[in-house]
Image: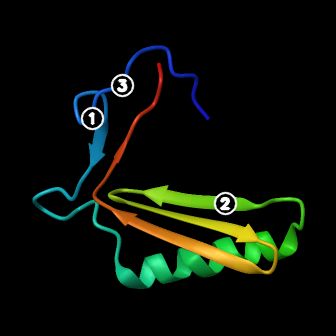
Amino acid sequence: MVKITKELSFPEDFYKFSTLSDKSNDITDNEINKWIKECIEELKQDNKRTWTQIASGNTRVIVIRENDKFNIYVMKDYWEFEDD
């Protein structure tokens, strides 16, 4: 969670995690599927946690548990803001 210290403007204040022209940071579908399974297993093993994520290159996977159901978000070439 970040503390917002200024009025944000999209896209000027955001960083884009995008695929490089040589695709060296592109995460494969197989790797994404592994991440999803890892995140679900992590949440199943720790009942106190409600969410987890894995991110690398141009991709972020977020899994949120609500009761016994999982919401899974896969983002490729996404934008992100971090307050400095």
- Choose the circle earlier in sequence order: 2 or 3: 3
> Residue at coordinates 45% horizontally, 31% vertically from top-left?
82
Give the alpha-carbon distance from disc 3 to disc 1, as whole Å. Answer: 7 Å
**Which x, y percent locates residue 63?**
62, 68
- Choose the circle earlier in sequence order: 2 or 1: 1
Query: Which numbered circle lies on residue 10?
Result: 1
Q: Nearer the viewer, residue 2 or 33?
A: 2
Q: Which residue is mark 3?
A: 8
Q: Nearer the viewer, residue 77 or 19?
A: 77
Q: Residue furthest left?
A: 21
Disc 2 residue type?
A: Thr
Disc 1 residue type?
A: Phe
The image's colouring method is rainbow
Query: Which numbered circle lies on residue 52?
Result: 2
> Residue at coordinates 47% horizontally, 23% vertically from top-left?
83
Report crowding for label 2: few under 14, some 14 to 19, many 20 or more residues within 10 A (C-alpha): some
